[in-house]
Amino acid sequence: MNRKMMILAVLSLLMLASANCSVGPDVVGVTDDITPDRAVTYTEDFEKCTASGTTYVTGSFVGNNSRTWNYVQTAWAGGVIAGSKTPVLGMNRSPISELYTTVSDGVGTLTFSYKKPYSTAVSLSVYAGTTLLGTVTTSGTTVLTKTYTVNKSGSVKIRFVQSGTSSGQVSIDTVSWTSYGTTSSSSSSVSSSSSVSSSSSSAASGTIKIASFNIEIFGTTKISRANVLYTLAHIATRYDIIAIQEVGSNGTPSESTATTVMDTYIAKVNSIAGAGAYSYVRGHQYAFVYKNATITKKASGLYSGSKTFTYTPLRGNFAVKSGNFDFAMLTIHTSPSVAVTEIPALTTAMSETRTFYSEQDVICLGDYNADGSYYSAGTAGGDLAGFASSTYVTVIKNGTDTTVSPNNSYTYDRMQLYTASSEDYTGNKGVLKFASYYTISNLEGTTTTAGTEGALSDHYPIWAEFYTGRDTN
Ligand SMILES: [Ca+2]
Ligand SMILES: [Ca+2]
Ligand SMILES: [Ca+2]
Ligand SMILES: [Ca+2]
């Protein structure tokens, strides 16, 4: 080989090497005193109320999570925001129209949707106990969403009440709030592993939430849609770490596009959660977005083991800041046509990640395409085929619908653990179905997706909760 060819060969090797290590820079802000997201989120959609009609009535019903809601001079038709039931507070009624419930485990943030159903402008006061959080007003018929930071522990009365006798009728729906304050440590202090040496006992009751979300073709078009970006950013703030797939494209993105998308996204997330609240690391079509108040990222990089994947997975090594839970993460988007070989190969990639980071807890999460015509997942309610329960924990069981399409209920999105993480996994997990938590009607999109959940993605996020103080390996 002559000198020129040698240089070319070295150059192409360098390019190959850099392509393999194309992990983006961390974007790290100042760590802020953001309240750790260890709370339970509740949502009331009012669908369980059996009252109906446009007459203003007074009564109560038992809603989601067995919670009793009281309504005064409220109609149950005529101004629907979401689903088929939306309470509508009357105008100039006697007694004055209001809607309330009392929670026992505190309120961190409170979010709700509202709109003007008729002709008179809205002026609605929102209270947490006797504290006036604010008065929302609107003179348009668009559905709006408001969030208040409450941060009150214990018993809190959430109350929506007309601000005065000239306040117009108002529709209220999708009321969502997080619990707040220290949760009882009685259940977690009886851990069988309480003899474990390290760890501050105060962290034993803490938990974190880890999620995975395929944000369908998360590119420049999607981030230019203001309401879509805002909603996607809100979703990240629900979790301590979220693994994202399809950053930049649903295949192999350009580095600059993927970085632009994630820079824009993290800026929006932090505009909601607080300056510097979240950081990210990215590589290939993946990113991990993590909360600086609760999570330390120790290392990250593209998977470099023995198996080949169409979209080389991103992995990282993390630890909680308060407690002793340390863990590795490996995120994947399989190529549907070869899911049948890539899914079993993940067991090798998990094992190699375990060795690579010397960490027993490996969380392998992402869009596995592990269902439908792509993969025979196994029986409904059971564990993912290829991941024996003697070695693995299938968090998202077969038969769980993770697709937005109402026409199928495939369990494409998955989270697999080793049994080494059984001590850390609380058993709480879920699928975040957008319309139960967010206003969908104002989302920008194509002619087929605008105003629908499909404006956000064709996949729902999946999540699971982990103890921060029970790790032994
Ligand atoms: Ca509703
Ligand atoms: Ca560990
Ligand atoms: Ca579905
Ligand atoms: Ca463990």
Image (spheres, rainbow, N blue to C red):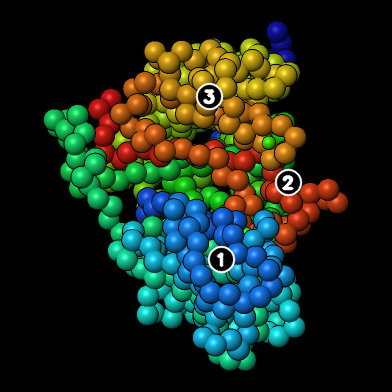
Q: Which mark is residue 381?
A: 3
Percent x, y of residue 393: 43, 22
**Disc 1 and disc 3: Cα gap in Å?**
33 Å
Label 3 sits on a secondary structure element that is loop
Residue at the (30%, 29%) spot, across then down: 423
- Within 10 Å of disc 2 (Cα), the crowding (few <14, some 14-19, many 20+) is many
Quadrant assignment, res 302: top right
Direction right: furthest residue: 447
Percent x, y of residue 204: 24, 42
Decide: is 467 above or below 54: above
Quadrant assignment, res 458: top right
Q: Is residue 44 left or right of residue 426?
A: right
Q: Considering the image in quadrants, where does the C terminus appear?
A: top left
The residue nearer to you, when weighing 143 against 67, is 67
Residue at the (24%, 40%) spot, across then down: 188
Q: Is residue 1 left or right of residue 283?
A: right
**Disc 2 and disc 3: Cα gap in Å?**
26 Å
Q: Considering the image in quadrants, where does the N terminus appear?
A: top right
**Residue type beneath disc 2:** Gly
Q: Is residue 29 left or right of residue 310?
A: left
Q: Which mark is residue 155?
A: none
The residue nearer to you, when weighing 445 against 410, is 410
Label 1 sits on a secondary structure element that is strand
Q: Earlier in the sequence, mark 1 or mark 3?
A: 1
Q: Earlier in the sequence, mark 2 or mark 1?
A: 1
Which residue is tagged 2?
Answer: 454
Which residue is tagged 1?
Answer: 112
**Residue type beneath disc 3:** Gly
Residue at the (71%, 75%) spot, across then down: 117
Residue 232 visible to the viewer: no
The residue nearer to you, when weighing 103 against 90, is 90
Q: Are marks 2 and 1 in contact (CB under 8 Å)?
A: no
